[in-house]
Image (cartoon, rainbow, N blue to C red):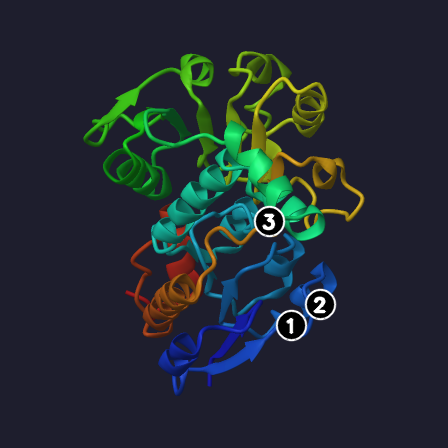
């Protein structure tokens, strides 16, 4: 029977889909050595943790690495391609979850929820109410979205149609902008936005995109929300700006180092919301991501190509490895 290795436990519906199609095994640990060793006999691996490049050298039976989500930075694409392993993902399935997180984070920052809640609990009713006089509304503000994929589009729709925000975006896409979304360059967007949302993938071009010079162009009360990847932001530059009070605050769900060390400076700011890479995780999104990944695994095990194949250039190599594939 084929072996399906998952880095994490799957949603029960996803596990049920794979029953009978293969022997589903959850990795015993997520370190590189363990993943490489436990993938040696795998036909398919479902990915929610970074894979070491060496895994693809030793996994001779491996047909596909299927991302439990959209971002492909957890899969070393060059190593997968060199080994003739198909890479697929399930794009868009957690877009709504992430978009709702972004609105939650913006509201919490603008209404000063962290300090209000703390002072209400420790100092009393009136101390909590003191923060409300400097709280702010979403309506009428400009939200700038960097990256206009499924998440960016979901944010734009909710922001414009649900909260009355002015929506602008910076994107490399040549597609027309969605309704009520204006397109700007990244630098103009940063200068004009009250809330900047990072939804772009991590690529060589976006690594360090939000640097010291761009942060210096932000409005003095602007907010930065990052649901992209940690390295998109220059941490030292953002920490410096927060220390000097040059921006209004930040909500950060992703970090260059994860888990974030408990003594990290981000934890010291009252105007920073820190969350453990959970923007896209809800019961509903886990079901959608899990069943989507399981569906792609079933296609591969049935000698078919995944719907969301991300490295089509390896198909001929793959077919030579597994001649029965169509």
**Marks 1/2: CA–CA distance:** 6 Å
CB under 8 Å between callouts 3 and 2? no
Q: Position of residue 12 (x, y in %)?
A: 43, 79
- Mark number, residue 21: none
- Give the residue number, with chain letter if any, for mark 2: 34
What residue did someone put label 1 on?
38
Q: Earlier in the sequence, mark 3 or mark 2?
A: 2
Label 1's element? helix
Q: Residue at x 26, y 38 (%)?
A: 157
Quadrant of the snapshot with the C terminus: bottom left
Specify the quadrant of the image occupied by residue 33.
Answer: bottom right
Circle 3: element type: loop
**Looking at the rendered structure, which numbered label has been put on residue 275?**
3
Q: Residue furthest right?
A: 263
Residue 147 location (% of width, % of height): 39, 32
| 181 or 73, nearer to the observer | 181
Q: Count neighbours of disc 2 (C-alpha within 10 A) and say few if under 14, some if 14 to 19, many if 20 or more.
A: some
**The one of 83 and 46 positioned closer to us in this rendering:** 46
Check contact, mark 1 vs mark 2: CB within 8 A. Answer: yes
Check the image and report above or below for 2 versus 193: below
Other residues around mark 3 within 10 Å, as few (<14) / some (14–19) / many (≥20): some
Horizontal side, residue 121 vs residue 3: left or right: right
Instruction: Answer with mark 1 or mark 3, whichever residue precedes in sequence.
Output: 1
Q: Give the side of residue 150 with respect to residue 241, left or right.
A: left
Front disc: 1 or 3 = 3
Q: Nearer the viewer, mark 3 or mark 2?
A: 3
When asked about the image quadrant of residue 149, the answer is top left
């Amino acid at each position: 029977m084929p072996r399906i290795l998952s880095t994490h436990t799957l949603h029960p519906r996803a596990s049920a889909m794979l029953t009978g199609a293969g022997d589903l095994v959850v990795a015993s640990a997520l370190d590189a050595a363990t993943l490489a060793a436990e993938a040696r006999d795998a036909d398919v691996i479902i990915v929610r943790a970074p894979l070491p490049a060496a895994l693809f050298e030793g996994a001779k039976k491996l047909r596909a690495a299927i991302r439990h989500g959209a971002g492909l930075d957890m899969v070393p694409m060059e190593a997968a391609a060199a080994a003739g392993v198909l890479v697929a993902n399930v794009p868009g399935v957690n877009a709504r979850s992430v978009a709702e997180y972004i609105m939650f984070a913006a509201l919490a920052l603008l209404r000063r929820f962290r300090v209000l809640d703390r002072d209400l609990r420790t100092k009393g009713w009136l101390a909590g109410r003191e923060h409300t006089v400097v709280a702010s509304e979403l309506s009428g503000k400009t939200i700038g979205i960097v990256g206009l994929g499924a998440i960016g589009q979901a944010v734009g729709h909710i922001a414009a149609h649900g909260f009355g925000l002015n929506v602008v975006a910076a994107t490399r896409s040549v597609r027309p902008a969605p309704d009520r979304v204006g397109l700007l360059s990244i630098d103009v967007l940063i200068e004009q936005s009250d809330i900047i949302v990072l939804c772009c993938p991590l690529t060589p071009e976006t690594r360090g995109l939000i640097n010291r010079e761009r942060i210096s162009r932000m409005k003095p009360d602007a907010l930065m929300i990052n649901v992209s990847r940690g390295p998109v932001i220059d941490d030292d530059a953002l920490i410096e700006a927060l220390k000097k009070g040059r921006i209004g605050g930040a909500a950060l769900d992703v970090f260059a180092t994860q888990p974030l060390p408990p003594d990290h400076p981000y934890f010291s700011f009252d105007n920073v919301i820190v969350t453990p890479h959970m923007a896209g995780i809800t019961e509903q999104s886990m079901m959608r991501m899990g069943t989507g990944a399981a569906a792609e695994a079933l296609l591969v095990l049935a000698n078919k190509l995944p719907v969301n194949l991300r490295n089509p250039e390896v198909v001929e190599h793959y077919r030579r490895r597994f001649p029965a594939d169509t």
